[in-house]
Image (tube, rainbow, N blue to C red):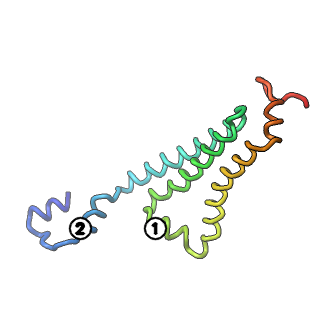
Amino acid sequence: MDKLKKVLSGQDTEDRGGLSEVVEATSLSSGTRIKGFIACFAAGILCSLLGTLLLWVPRKGLYLFAVFYTFGNIASLGSTVFLMGPMTQLKRMFEPTRLIATIMVLGRCKEVFYCVSCITHSHVCKALENTVDGYGWTVL
């Protein structure tokens, strides 16, 4: 609103670049940032919990766990983008003091998918799947 008043009154005569106009137009208010953070963080926690609960579904449980748990972790980590912005988040993640933690977290997300694919294709997992009935684990 202040911008509109300046333009209509003739006080805003400076020629600004296109980038500054884009940044100003796409910036979020603090209330919107907090709401986005809470929504994204809650979705991340919900997906992580759902993935953990789906772990016990026979046959497809490991795949569902990998997808939902990893998506939940990424959503929870990505929720901080609403608080500080994407470029600041990336700069802080890759600072020398946080680089090892960033590599470990992103590596663990990748390892979840790798482990699930290895476990589901092994003969041990196939043997265990055959021992499961509709109500839970049976005695071997």
Q: Residue 37: where, in percent of width, then height?
A: 47, 52
What type is the residue that disc 2 sits on? Answer: Gly
Q: In the rendered image of this protein, does residue 139 appear above or below residue 15? A: above
Element assignment for label 2: helix
Disc assigned to residue 18: 2
Q: Which residue is mark 1?
A: 88
Quarter holding residue 132? top right
95 to the left or right of 117: left
- Seen from the viewer's position, the closer of residues 43 and 1 is 43
What type is the residue that disc 1 sits on? Answer: Thr
Quarter holding residue 55? top right
- Seen from the viewer's position, the closer of residues 13 and 99 is 99
Q: In the rendered image of this protein, does residue 100 appear above or below residue 72? A: below
Q: Residue 42: where, in percent of width, then height?
A: 53, 45
- Seen from the viewer's position, the closer of residues 113 and 136 is 113
Residue at image location 59% in from the left, 76% down from the top: 96
Q: In the rendered image of this protein, does residue 137 appear above or below residue 83? A: above
